Amino acid sequence: MRAQEPCTNFSITVLNSNLIKRIPFGLILIVLLGTLLRFYAIDRLPPGLFGDEAVEGLDALDILAGNWQIWFHAHLGREPLFVYLVATSYFFFGVSPFATRLPAILAGIVTIPAAYWLTREWCAQLFSAERARRIAILTALLLAISFWHLELSRNAHRDILLPLVQAVGYAVLWRAIRLREVRLYALAGAILGLAIYTYSPGRFVGVFIAAFCALELFLARYARRVRELSTVSFNGRGFWLAGGAALLVMLPLGIYFAQNPAQFSRRFESVSILRAEQPLSVLSESIAGNLAMFVVPGAGYASTHYNLPGKPVFDLFLAPWFIAGIVLAFARARRAEYRFLLLWFFIMLMPAFLTSDMIPKGVRDFGVVPGVFVFPALAADWVLGKFGTRKDAKDAKGTIETKGVNRGLTLPHLVIAFSLVASALLTVNDYFFEWAKLPTLPTAFDQDYAQVAAFVRREPANEPIYVSAEVYRHPTFMLLGQQIPTSRYFDRATHVREFDARSALVAGADDANAAYVFLGDYAPSAGWLARIAVPAAPLEQHENFSVFRLARLQSPQQMLKESFNPFLKLVGVARFADDPRGLALYWQVTTLPDDRAETQARSVLFDARSQPLTQFEHRIGVPPMDWHIGDVIVDWFEIELPANAARFSAQLERGAEKWESAPIAFDDLRGK
């Protein structure tokens, strides 16, 4: 027999909760507000699609291609849950920036009522039902209007799932503790076990729960000796069942890590403070920086992708409430619920404390959400309880009750309302106006690659396209323009091929009227373009890229047949004494290499007595995976040719292999 809320059926336990039976109207309005903020202008903010977001999409395409995985290797390894959600979004809505971000948007919205439920369950034994509901409403509202959570809800990043898993898991856990229902313990363990599938800081959820349980079991031995010290009364069977359920859920990824231990620590090792020359100094700097980001203006996360650079988590309207809430939690730390909240905050900051690549690192701090928003809610509730509404008293069990009558609308009500409204308006201004007009924003979110991808998708699939860009096979372009699954990321290029037009142009043997796309500064100079290609008329001119139709390449000044390399044959050469001065070598692809090793080209100049004068080299601007047999690659060196240069030799190098042509006399070029 149970003394509290008897439960004879598991489904009744879950579904017959206060959250389901009576959803406050205020919560509905808050969820609607959060939904509006997370969907409004999503077609243009963020612009483009950040490369990290695109990587999630590439792996999602791999899933849709039948390559199901428990761990994804791109970008130092990533957890799978968000990727599978993106794959589901693509299945229903197709590949687009919106479909890539939709799982994050929905997760951010659902976290709002989940935070309400968590807070209600967490403080159910601390306060009366009315106060518990008030604190929960305030927490949900603070989360809904948070710039931090809003930004990450609109960005396709897997960290957005961690607060949702924690909110639901902890809500079920506190309900299990209160009702002593073993099946709820099992459910809580299973939900929290999902944390390791969300984002790498999710591994600290197990650390936090283990630390909290160990602390409570330790304090339980001394509770009778310490006045007013309350501890959690765990159901022993439920406690072990929760742990077993969590381990069972984590088992597939755990087995993978056991078989591939390097993957478990690969990301951490790349950014760990242990790599620093003075780890303790970096640790202290990291702790200070990651704590300051919550309240100190200008000390917030500096990444444009995830924040208005420097903006703290709590603005000036909410920072005092947050600080007061922290103080209040420490003052009430004799209660287990407050120890839970404080441990959650500090342990889930550990992933950021222990890394040094960026201080503060806002995304690694995200495990404190939604619990961090309970602190200002507690402070606001205390002010209302002390000065604004009813007088508080404790019953014999230590539960805080309310007595007396409501005092009506008071100054504390107005101050709290002002703080919340002002913060909400500031969030709207900072995100939709200040952050949106940052001049670096389009570049940060790879809008140029997204625009080129849109152009490529509009072009006929049977016409060749050559793209010159700063990043070879940029994830955003590969996702939106070519929709290539990760497992085929480095397959040989077919319809769309990439090169570096600053030093090379390429034409296929059968290409006719091919389109050449030059992104930003990755275009040949006007002089070299006119000299190498005929005609070179612009087809389209955009802010971030230009498109040319090149009917053919110019013929070299002299035709050659130098076959000193197994992959490339030197078929022509041209030198230019007028600006831009330099040497152009014409290569033809004869055989395709089976690896991605790049090719270095070097030319050595000799005088008439075959004495070397100078040499110059660079990487051939067309990567091997974009070669096709019969391609002609014009590779130029913009240099000042010595007046007495009479001969030259061409050299090629791939990895450990080197090849060199026979000397070629410049005299052979005269009159050509």
Image (tube, grey):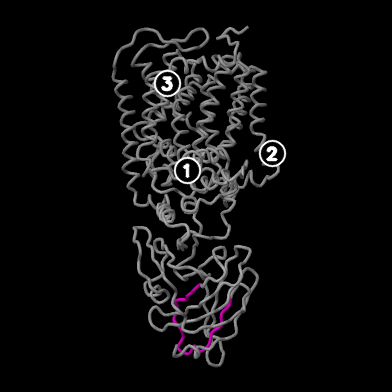
Name above or below for residue 223 compared with residue 367: above
N-term-proximal mark, 2 vs 3: 3
Q: Is residue 562 left or right of residue 127?
A: right
Do we see residue 289 in this rendering?
Answer: no
Label 3, on which residue? Answer: 135
The answer to which quarter of the image holds residue 392 is top left
Query: Percent from the top left, x then y, of residue 462?
Result: 48, 60
Q: Residue at x 42, y 49 (%)?
A: 445
Label 2 element class? helix
Name above or below for residue 344 compared with residue 44: above
On-image quarter of the C terminus:
bottom left
Query: Percent from the top left, x then y, of residue 451?
Result: 40, 53
N-term-proximal mark, 2 vs 1: 1
**Could you tell me if the residues under marks 1 and 3 are in contact, i.e. CB atoms within 8 Å?**
no
**Closest to the observer, 606 or 346:** 606
The amino acid beneath tag 3 is: Ile
Query: Percent from the top left, x then y, of residue 9?
Result: 60, 13
Label 3 element class? helix
Label 1, on which residue? Answer: 94
The amino acid beneath tag 1 is: Gly
Region of the chain picked out in magenta, as a range:
633-651
Residue 213 included in the magenta stretch of the image:
no
Name above or below for residue 68 compared with residue 580: above
Residue 649 included in the magenta stretch of the image:
yes
Dot 3 alpha-carbon crowd within 10 angstroms: few under 14, some 14 to 19, many 20 or more: many
Label 2, on which residue? Answer: 255
Q: Residue at x 51, y 26 (%)?
A: 341
**Closest to the observer, 111 or 121:** 111
